[in-house]
Image (tube, grey):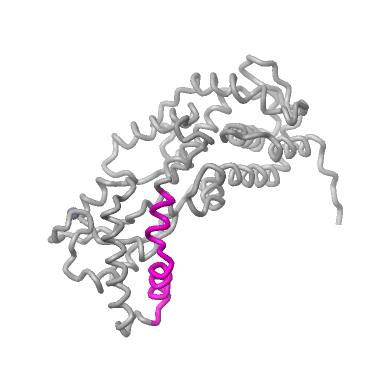
């Protein structure tokens, strides 16, 4: 088997990606955008910052609308581009009834991106700084400070080695995000945005389990009975934080109570209520011949024993 030498340009990119300092995640989205453009157009030589800006917007849209991860080391200083993305996400939701996250690729034509503003930020913070590693300038592309485009002489090589480069970028992005975020499953959350379909699994298998403890369909949020409608199944600690569906975090609510609260962090009273519900549900499951031996029962028991509700609640508030 042949082992081709990895071209120097790829080594340089890897070095920049792995060793660059990251007070935010701009450099990683910047690198990812360049690689993606080269994959799409392997003969390209001149890449405009505008083209990069659109890709960067896409990555932050997908990352933010699904998982809302903090993208800089200062929670009070949201990176400008992320702020811009958040504004556009809110504008998009205003035109919709529900706050179901959606991939940027599916709504692209409806979103009016302020590329000029993003280009400005990339120009002042990223474009000229990216090639610098420990004060050394690596020849990853040709660029003069202030210009609106950069020159790559090796798009085909970047395209050919894109798998390695993407993996390095995602790995570094994960590492950087982990220093800013206490949310679980960061690596998965970074990797999954590369796939056009983030399938949220149906929650219907949980319905009969929730029935055991709440047969009268009392809404977890407002405390009123749910009549004349199928109860919605709601995540008490937001799905965007956990990126997982767990029995200990799921409750029945009115359809309207459910959609109105979306990604808000629950109050301590809600957390106490959920803890009590879990203890009650576990007791009932343990004596239910249909459920006591099932995985879902063991999972609930683990969650109760290990205090998952409170632990994840504390983590999602930080
Ligand atoms: Zn309700």
Is 13 left, or right, of 78 in this rendering?
Answer: right
**Which image quadrant: the N terminus?**
bottom right
Res. 150 image quadrant: top right
Q: Which quarter of the frame holds ligand 1?
A: bottom left
Across and down, in percent, residue 210 comes to: 28, 68
Q: Tell me the magenta residue range.
A: 293-316
Instruction: Count all numbered tags in the image, as a single digit.
Output: 0
Q: Which image quadrant is residue 161 in?
A: top right
Residue sitting at x 61%, y 17%: 148
Observer-nearest of 305 and 185:
305
Q: In the image, is residue 202 above or below residue 133?
A: below
Position of residue 279 relative to residue 109, above or below, is below
x%, y% of residue 289? 32, 85
Q: Position of residue 119 (x, y in %)?
A: 54, 21
Question: In terms of depth relative to the viewer, which is nearer, 127 or 43?
Answer: 127
Q: Nearer the viewer, residue 104 or 249?
A: 249
Q: Is residue 121 above or below residue 197?
A: above
Task: Answer whether residue 290 is magenta in the image.
Answer: no
Q: Classify residue 2 as left or right of residue 43.
A: right
Look at the picture and state if 305 lies above or below 46: below
Q: Residue at x 56, y 34 (%)?
A: 24
Q: Position of residue 109 (x, y in %)?
A: 42, 32
Q: Residue furthest top?
A: 146
Quadrant where the image shows the C terminus = top left
User: Considering depth in this image, is 90 or 35 the residue closer to the camera?
Assistant: 90
Q: Main secondary structure of the magenta part?
A: helix
């Amino acid at each position: 088997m042949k082992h081709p030498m990895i071209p120097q340009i790829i080594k340089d990119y890897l070095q920049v990606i792995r060793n660059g300092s990251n007070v935010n995640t701009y450099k990683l989205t910047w690198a990812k955008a360049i690689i993606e453009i080269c994959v799409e157009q392997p003969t390209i030589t001149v890449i405009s910052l505008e083209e990069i800006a659109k890709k960067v917007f896409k990555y932050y849209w997908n990352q933010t609308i699904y998982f809302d991860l903090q993208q800089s080391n200062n929670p009070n200083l949201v990176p400008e581009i992320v702020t811009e993305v958040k504004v556009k996400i809110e504008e998009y939701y205003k035109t919709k009834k529900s706050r179901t996250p959606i991939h940027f690729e599916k709504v692209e034509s409806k979103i009016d991106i302020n590329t000029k503003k993003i280009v400005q930020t990339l120009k002042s913070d990223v474009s000229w700084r990216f090639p610098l590693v420990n004060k050394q300038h690596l020849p990853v592309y040709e660029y003069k400070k202030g210009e609106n485009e950069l020159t790559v002489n090796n798009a085909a090589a970047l395209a050919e080695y894109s798998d390695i480069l993407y993996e390095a970028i995602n790995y570094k992005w994960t590492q950087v995000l982990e220093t800013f975020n206490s949310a679980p499953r960061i690596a998965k959350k970074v990797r999954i945005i590369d796939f056009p379909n983030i399938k949220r699994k149906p929650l219907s298998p949980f319905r009969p389990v929730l029935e055991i403890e709440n047969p009268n369909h009392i809404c977890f949020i407002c405390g009123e009975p749910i009549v004349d409608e199928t109860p919605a199944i709601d995540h008490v600690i937001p799905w965007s934080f956990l990126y997982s569906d767990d029995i200990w975090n799921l409750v029945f609510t009115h359809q309207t109570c459910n959609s109105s609260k979306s990604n808000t962090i629950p109050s301590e009273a809600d957390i106490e209520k959920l803890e009590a519900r879990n203890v009650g549900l576990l007791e009932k499951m343990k004596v239910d011949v249909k459920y006591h031996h099932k995985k879902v029962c063991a999972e609930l028991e683990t969650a109760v024993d290990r205090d998952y509700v409170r632990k994840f609640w504390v983590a999602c508030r930080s």
